Image (spheres, rainbow, N blue to C red):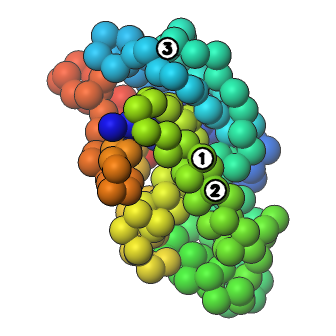
C-alpha cells in the first residue's frame, strides 16, 4: 500500500493584497515548516518522492522542512489558484467586494461557484485547475511508494473534490479551515485512493505552539 501526504505551505504574507506580495513566507511560516520537518523526520521519513509547486511560498516551505529523504522536484500543477484575480473578477461582475480575512468563509463559496459556472475566470478556468490537480494526484498514486506534496489550500480542496465528489460550495467549505503547514493523508490501496487524514498539525499540538496554528 502506498501513501501521499499533502502539506499546505507555511504562513505567507497575510497583509498582501495581490498574489505577488502574498507569495513569500513570514518568519512564523518558516518556523511552522521547520517544526513540521522535525516531526516528519522523527515519524514519517524517508519519502520516495517529494514534489512542490513552483510558487515561492511552496518552495520556501519545502526548503525549511529540510532533508526528508528525496530531493524536491517542482511541479507547477501543485500551484494555487489565483484567488486575488478571481476575487476581483467576482467584484467586477457581481459587485461582491474582496473580503477581510474574517469574511473569507462567506466569500470563498461565491468565488468557487461563479468560477465553476464560468461566470468569472482568472488565469485559468475551473476545469483547467481541476484537470491539473487530478493529473498530479493520479501520477502520485504509486502502489508501495510514499510521496510528499508541498502545495496550497485550494489544491488540497480540489484533491478532496476528486476523492469525495464534492460540489464547489463544499470544496470552499473544506479549504477555508485548512491550517498553514497542515498534513492531509491519502492511502493508495489496490482498490483505489482513500482520504485517511485531514488538516492534522501534530507539530503544533503542544500548548506552547498554539499561537502557531494559523489559517492565513
Quadrant position of the N terminus in the picture: top left
Name which residue lies at 78% across and 68% down. Answer: 124
In the rendered picture of this protein, how many numbered marks are placed on residues?
3
Tag 1's secondary structure?
Answer: helix
| Image depth: mark 3 or mark 2 in front | 2
Tag 2's secondary structure?
Answer: helix
Name which residue lies at 36% across and 29% down. Answer: 212
Residue 68, numbered label:
3
Whole-angstrom CA distance, mark 3 to mark 1, is 20 Å
Residue 12: x percent and y percent? 59, 36
Left or right, 142 with respect to 199, comes to right
- Mark found first going from the N terminus, 3 or 1: 3
Whole-angstrom CA distance, mark 1 to mark 2, is 6 Å
Q: Quadrant of residue 24?
A: top right
Above or below — where is 161 with respect to 214?
Answer: below
Residue 110, numbered label:
none
Amino acid at each position: 500500500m502506498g501513501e501521499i501526504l499533502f502539506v499546505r505551505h507555511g504562513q505567507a504574507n497575510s497583509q498582501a493584497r495581490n498574489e505577488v506580495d502574498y507569495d513569500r513566507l513570514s518568519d512564523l511560516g518558516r518556523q511552522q515548516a521547520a517544526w513540521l520537518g522535525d516531526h516528519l523526520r522523527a515519524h514519517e521519513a524517508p519519502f520516495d518522492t517529494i514534489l512542490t509547486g513552483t510558487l515561492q511560498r511552496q518552495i520556501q516551505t519545502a526548503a525549511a522542512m529540510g532533508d526528508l529523504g528525496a530531493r524536491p522536484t517542482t511541479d507547477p500543477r501543485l500551484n494555487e489558484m489565483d484567488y486575488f484575480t478571481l476575487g476581483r473578477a467576482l467584484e467586477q461582475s457581481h459587485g461582491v467586494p474582496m473580503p477581510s480575512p474574517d469574511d473569507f468563509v462567506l466569500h470563498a463559496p461565491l468565488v468557487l461557484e461563479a468560477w465553476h459556472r464560468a461566470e468569472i475566470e482568472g488565469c485559468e478556468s475551473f476545469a483547467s485547475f481541476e484537470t491539473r490537480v487530478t493529473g498530479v494526484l493520479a501520477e502520485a498514486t504509486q502502489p508501495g511508494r510514499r510521496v510528499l506534496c508541498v502545495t496550497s489550500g485550494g489544491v488540497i480542496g480540489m484533491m478532496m473534490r476528486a476523492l469525495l465528489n464534492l460540489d464547489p460550495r463544499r470544496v470552499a467549505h473544506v479549504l477555508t479551515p485548512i491550517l498553514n503547514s497542515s498534513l492531509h493523508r491519502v492511502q493508495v490501496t489496490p482498490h483505489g485512493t482513500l482520504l485517511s487524514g485531514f488538516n492534522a498539525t501534530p507539530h503544533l499540538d503542544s500548548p506552547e505552539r498554539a499561537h502557531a496554528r494559523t489559517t492565513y
